[in-house]
Structure formats: C-alpha cells, structure tokens
Image: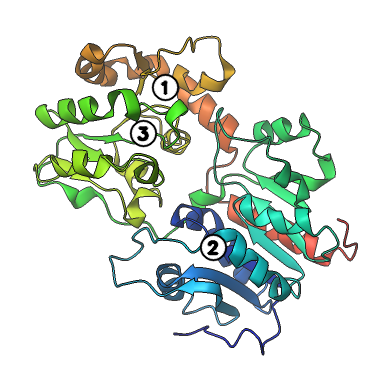
Amino acid sequence: MRGRADDGAMTAAPVAFLFLGETLLIPHLFPIVEALAALRPDLPLDLWVATSRHEALLAGWTADLPQVRIRRAPGYRTLPAAAAGERPVLPPKLPMLLRLAPRLARARVIVCAEQTSLWLPRAFPWMRTRFVKTSHGVGSMSARDDRRRMAAAYTLVPSEQERATYLSRGMPAERIEATGYVKAAFRQRTPARALFADDRPVLLYTPHWQAHRSSWPAWGPQVVEQLAEQRDWNVILAPHQRLVERAPEIRAVLSQVAGLPHVHADLDSFATVDGSYTAVADLYLGDTSSQLIEFLTNPRPAVFLNAQRRRWADDPAYAMWRAGEVVEDLRDLLPGIARAPARHAEFAAVQRDIAAAALGDASGAGAMCAAAAILRVLANTDPRR
C-alpha cells in the first residue's frame, strides 16, 4: 500500500499526525492534514496509524497528496477485512507510544487529538519535538482538567468559550488558540439518507459511553423498546463508540430490533463518528454527548433523557439541556418526542447560541486556521514554545 515505509531507515517528516486511537478521532484530525497539504504542498507529512483499518481509510483519501506518507506504528495490527471504517480493536496505546517515541523525536511538530499521546511530552519534557493538541470533544461536560493537556506546546480549541475554560485552569494564553470547529471541514462522510425505504422523519438516539453521564444504564433497553414499537419516526440507534466496551449487553439489545424496517442499529461503522448521522437526523434524542453540539449547527428538535434524575437546571455542566425538552419519566418519552417538532421554536435561538459558543466558526474554515497555527509552531525555533 502506498506510504508503507521501512521506519527504521527513513527520516521523519517535519510534521507527524498520530492516528493511533479510536476512529472517532479521524474526522477531527484529517481535515487539518488536507489543509496543511493545500497551504504547503512541499511540506512532508507522516500519518502514523495503529491498524490496517486506519490505514485503509487514510490511503484512500491521500492518494492525490504525494507529500503524505502513511506509516505503521510499532505494534501495528493487521485486522480481518471489514466494512470500511468499522471500529477496530486497538493495540495497547502506551507500549506503542513508547516504542514510537524515538521515531517521533525526529519530527519537529506532532499533532494529536487525544490526551494519551501527551504522555510523551509529559514524561519526557526534554523532547525537542513540539506537540500540538487539537480538540475532539466540545460542550459543557468536556473533560478539561487532565494534567497531560498542559504538556502540549500548543493547543487548538474550536471557540473562545472553550479557550476561556483552559485559561481559567492556568494554561498560558500564548499557547492556546481558537480556530473554529475542525470537524466541520470533514468531507468523507458516509451517505446516510437512504437508510430507510420511506420518508418518515429520522430520530437519532446516541447515549453517552460514561455511565455517570449516560441514559443507557438506567433506561437504555426501555428506550430502545419504545422506539421500536412506535411507527411515526425512522430510528437510528448509534451509541457512542465506546459504550459497547462498557456495556457489552447493548449488542443483544440492539440486535432484537435491528431487523425492523424503521430501525437502523449501528455500533461499529465509521458513520457513527464521521458526522453522517447527526447531519441526517431530524430529531436528536440523547443525554450529554458532545454529538449534540455538532447536531445543533443546524438547529432541529432535541429531547434529553434525565435518567439519573439530576437537578440539572442550575448546573452549568448540563447547560446543553436548555436546547430541548428534558424527559424526567420514561412514560413521557414518546409524548415528548411527539411534541418536539411543534415546540422547536421555543428552543431554536438557544440552540444557535449553544452551538456558536461551543464550536465557534462551524463553516469548515477551522481546518485552515488550525493548519496555519501548526505552520507558525513549525516556524518557531524556540523548542520551549
């Protein structure tokens, strides 16, 4: 496959991108690769991958980018053939990073979208390579207190609101920049409108993966049952990619309804993370996933599930719930969904405000802004910056 290299014999490119984690990170990173290639066609770029499924996706998208090399990280896994983008079983991340560190040390800038890779600059602060961290989660519940974040030389966030949260935690102002929402520039979505034979409106249910934030542990199977029994909506059941790891029983629950003509159940495909389902849905049903913010870039009805009976109204962590009706009792689920289109006018302005504050510029320009920021880091000869 194009881009495969003898990593021990080749010099690292000036800029490396780490595609070592879940496929959900790809749409937050790859638009920056494309933007850098457009701004600097002469700039060599290394895309380090963890599995053959990462490699297959990226190879297809970079065939016309001669400055891009796809490189296999130590511990790379060749996985059985699967649908394009299907969620892979990843190799252990920290051993991979430690084995990869000597090769990464030859790059001048490394771009990542998750915190685990920041163990390298945190554990080895003498590395001259500068790490640029770009965001992949937004919203009032995003985790921002991880100490590894401070090890990045430069941090890219979507909005000034998000930047302010890091400044309040002590991040130096000169090391963080609001670029706009990078994922909005991702062009390789999976076509999703043709999932159903009729033109009924589409409802997307996407519970969060963390139990303390999710509607799944308390209500999930009952929600699925009610959605399967109704016939007013076509239903996409696409939980967060990590939920199946925490709640493996979800496969059996979804398999019981997956054959219904108005239900599309998806736990593994790339469409669960590339923005396809949030783009095609007419109503969002969920709890605290940052996918809501992505959905709100085009305001539409939303319904939230307070399965944990939170006193949420005055809790800033649940600010996103101002964007729609909050269901406090499962008996109100289907009535709440039925009311949502008529009530949408009550929430549309709030939805626009939430999306603009969290995402900044969602036009797709964020990828170019992020690429320009990386070029400035690359040009800075001070290894401490």
Q: Is residue 172 above or below residue 230?
A: below
Q: Nearer the viewer, residue 61 or 57?
A: 57
Residue occupied by mark 3: 207
The one nearer the camera, 373 or 364, is 373
Q: Nearer the viewer, mark 1 or mark 2?
A: 2
User: Mark 3 packing: few (<14 Cα in 10 Å), some, or many (20+)?
Assistant: many
Residue 219 visible here: yes
Label 1: few (<14), some (14–19) or many (≥20) C-alpha neighbours in 10 Å: some
- Closer to the N terminus: mark 3 or mark 1? 3
CA gap between label 3 and label 1 equals 22 Å
Asked if the residues shown at circle 3 and circle 1 are in contact, with their CB atoms under 8 angstroms apart, the answer is: no
Label 2 sits on a secondary structure element that is loop
Q: Secondary structure at mark 3?
A: loop
The residue indicated by pointer 1 is: 348
Q: Quadrant of the N terminus?
A: bottom left
Task: Give x and y (percent) for residue 167.
Answer: 77, 33
Residue found 28% across the figure and 34% down from its top:
282
What is the three-letter code of the residue carrying label 3? Pro
| Percent position of residue 259, x then y | 10, 46
Where is 95 relative to 152, above or below? below
Could you say where residue 224 lies in the image, as x and y percent from the top left? 21, 31
Q: Which residue is mark 2?
A: 20
The amino acid type of the residue labelled 1 equals Ala
